[in-house]
Image: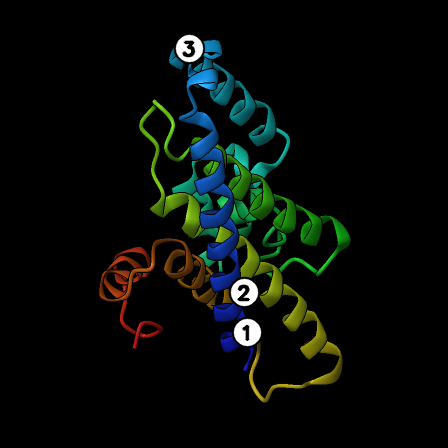
């Protein structure tokens, strides 16, 4: 049920992205906008906006691919000394970080910030990707949901097994990428490449 809800959320995020990006691109293509804003100026402003909004959070400050992998992974032996630990996803003693307000806020803000950056950047004169930012947004949402479920399960045991936030992060990433890009078969190949295994893909 939670996976289905994550899929619905990913679809809604895709709807928001496509609707806002289409309107923003239409505005950007108007002659009045083109006359007032030079492409070099536009790219410079986008780069400055991306820099200023990415730097405050550890998740957005690092390379997106590294942060995505960190959100996908579990907190096992040695994870506290790796990027997962530095990002606050795992504790120094290799346990999952508690569902603190700071962690949940950072995951939520990271998703919103990266979505805003993607909307602003995609279609601009500078080369801009869509797959990795979509995966990052979904991974942040999924990790947030997984962290909340893990905290709830520890107190009330809603699920017979332990909750792995990384699995929810994978599902969230796939859901948002599917919602934004409307991809199906290629999505499976992308997730297989990112996770490096067939366990969760199947």
Give the Cα distance between marks 2 and 1.
6 Å
Q: Which mark is residue 196?
A: none
Relative depth, front residue between 139 and 72: 139
Residue 147 in which image quadrant: bottom right
Question: Based on the displayed image, in which of its 4 quarters is residue 197 positioned?
Answer: bottom left
Would residue 91 be seen by someone viewing this image from the given angle? Answer: yes
Residue in front for this viewpoint, 174 or 29: 29
Residue 150, position as x, y percentages in the image: 64, 71
The answer to whether the residue labelled 2 contacts the one labelled 1, judged by CB atoms less than 8 Å apart, is: yes
Residue pictured at 64% horizontal, 45% vertical: 109
- The residue tagged with tag 1: helix, strand or loop? helix
**73, 124: nearer the viewer:** 124
Q: Where is residue 41? Give x, y as percent.
A: 45, 11
Give the structural element (helix, strand or loop) at label 3.
loop
- Residue labelled with disc 3: 38
Q: Which residue is mark 1?
A: 5
Where does residue 107 sit, x and y in percent of width and height? 62, 50
State the separation of the CA atoms marked 3 and 1. Answer: 42 Å
Scheme of colours in the image: rainbow
Tell me the tag on residue 9.
2
Q: Is residue 75 visible?
A: no
Dot 3 and dot 1 residues touching (CB under 8 Å): no
- The image quadrant where one finds the N terminus is bottom right
Residue 35 point in image, percent of width and height: 44, 11
Q: Is residue 92 left or right of residue 197?
A: right
- Horizontal arrangement in the rendering, residue 95 relative to residue 73 (left or right): right
Question: Which mark is first along the chain, 1 or 3?
Answer: 1
* Callout 2: SS: helix
- Tally of numbered discs: 3
Between discs 2 and 3, the one toward the N terminus: 2
Q: Tell which of 120 and 36 is nearer to you.
A: 36
């Amino acid at each position: 049920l939670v996976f289905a809800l994550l899929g619905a959320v990913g679809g809604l995020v895709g709807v928001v992205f496509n609707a806002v990006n289409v309107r923003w691109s239409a505005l950007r293509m108007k002659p009045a906008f083109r006359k007032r804003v030079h492409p070099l100026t536009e790219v410079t402003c986008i780069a400055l906006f991306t820099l200023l909004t990415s730097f405050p959070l550890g998740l957005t400050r690092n390379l997106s691919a590294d942060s995505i992998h960190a959100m996908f992974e579990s907190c096992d032996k040695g994870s506290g000394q790796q990027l997962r630990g530095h990002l606050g996803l795992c504790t120094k003693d290799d346990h999952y970080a508690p569902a603190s307000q700071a962690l949940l806020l950072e995951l939520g803000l990271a998703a919103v910030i990266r979505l805003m950056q993607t909307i602003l950047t995609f279609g601009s004169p500078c080369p801009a990707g869509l797959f990795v930012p979509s995966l990052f947004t979904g991974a942040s949402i999924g990790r947030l949901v997984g962290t909340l479920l893990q905290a709830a399960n520890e107190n009330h045991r809603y699920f017979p097994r332990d909750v792995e936030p990384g699995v929810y992060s994978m599902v969230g990433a796939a859901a948002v990428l599917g919602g934004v890009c409307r991809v199906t078969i290629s999505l499976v190949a992308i997730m297989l490449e990112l996770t490096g295994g067939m366990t969760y893909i199947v």
